Image (cartoon, rainbow, N blue to C red):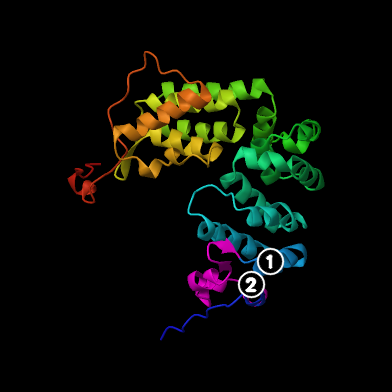
Amino acid sequence: MQTQRRVLKNAQEFIEVLRQVEEPSHFVDMDRSMSNLMIGTQPNPEAMKAFSDELATGTQNVRQHIINILSELRYLNSPSYELHTPEIIDLLVGPAFAKTDGGRSDAMDLLREYASTATLSRYGDVFTKALKEEPEDSALLLIAKAKPPEAKEEVERLSRLPEWNEPGSGMEAMRIARAALGDTKIEDEFIADADRAEKAGNAEELRNVMQTLAKIGTRRSLQAIGQRMRSPLIHDRVGIYKISVRLYAMDALRYAFPERPELDSREVSTDEDYIKVEKFCTQELGVSFDGVPRPYFITEIPYPSNYYDFIEPSTN
């Protein structure tokens, strides 16, 4: 018989549970409990104060769980994709940075994934200080999106250290940060990678490179993504689905512009939805589609569930 999960009344009860168990969702009705952290559609100030105090002093496990809770609370405040709730951002750039642990890394990742560059640019000094305290991939990628000029010197200093120039050691994050802060040679290499992938018809590789270009987030890198809104390339994962790389381009652009709802690839249902994104690329990024025909309309097409029933068995 399944035990009824507990409904927590306030943030302090959340904190007490988080201190005692590894995975609270096994014991807590999270949906109903989360609503008790709000007053209408606004975060409860008392809850934010309790979480702030715990973020400043708590263990890594508790801090990481609070970051997850804050990520969910933003949807209760506003159903939009963008992270723009001031009370939550204040905690993420404040007490969440108090310790150099996984909690801070999670806060950095949440900020860069869902906050706009305009929002992040207000905290350049905080992010630069964090990079100096504990250089890590999450800090470099956050710097890349926020683009604080004051971080350039520290990024360049770190880039000369051998540990940031070995494959698999964070070299990719370092290259992204350097390109984002003005190293056009590195940026050119990534843009050339995108061109090669498309020319070779390698949709999966093109998707990966576009995601990297989005993390760089300069106008030139974003233009290179926007140009793919008329790519006819289809990613064919045989037996699973076929999907237009234009959806991949939208996903990459949404990382750079979480505040723009027209970039949600899940909402594409007609060619008009693609046209809206093309207009965005032209108006906001200066992309020209002159002379490039619009591909036939396709989003994602799953293979039939019985696809493999029609494959002849091997004679080997």
Residue 161 visible within the image: yes
Which quarter of the figure has residue 163? top right
C-beta proximity under 8 Å, tags 1 and 2: yes
Mark sitting earlier along the chain (1/2): 2
Residue pointed to by mark 1: 51
Q: Which amino acid does label 1 sit on?
A: Phe
Q: Is mark 1 on a helix, strand or loop?
A: helix
- Residue 172 on image: x %, y %: 64, 36
State whether residue 144 is above or below residue 27: above
- Residue 268 on image: x %, y %: 34, 40
Residue 167 visible within the image: no
Residue pointed to by mark 2: 11
- The quadrant of the picture occupied by the C terminus is top left
State whether residue 233 is above or below residue 56: above
What span is colored magenta in the figure? 17-43
Q: Using a 10 Å C-alpha cutoff, classify the residue at mark 2 as few (fewer than 14 neighbours), some (14 to 19) or many (20 or more).
A: many
Answer whether residue 245 is magenta in the image: no
Which quarter of the figure has residue 125? top right
Q: What element carries label 2?
A: helix
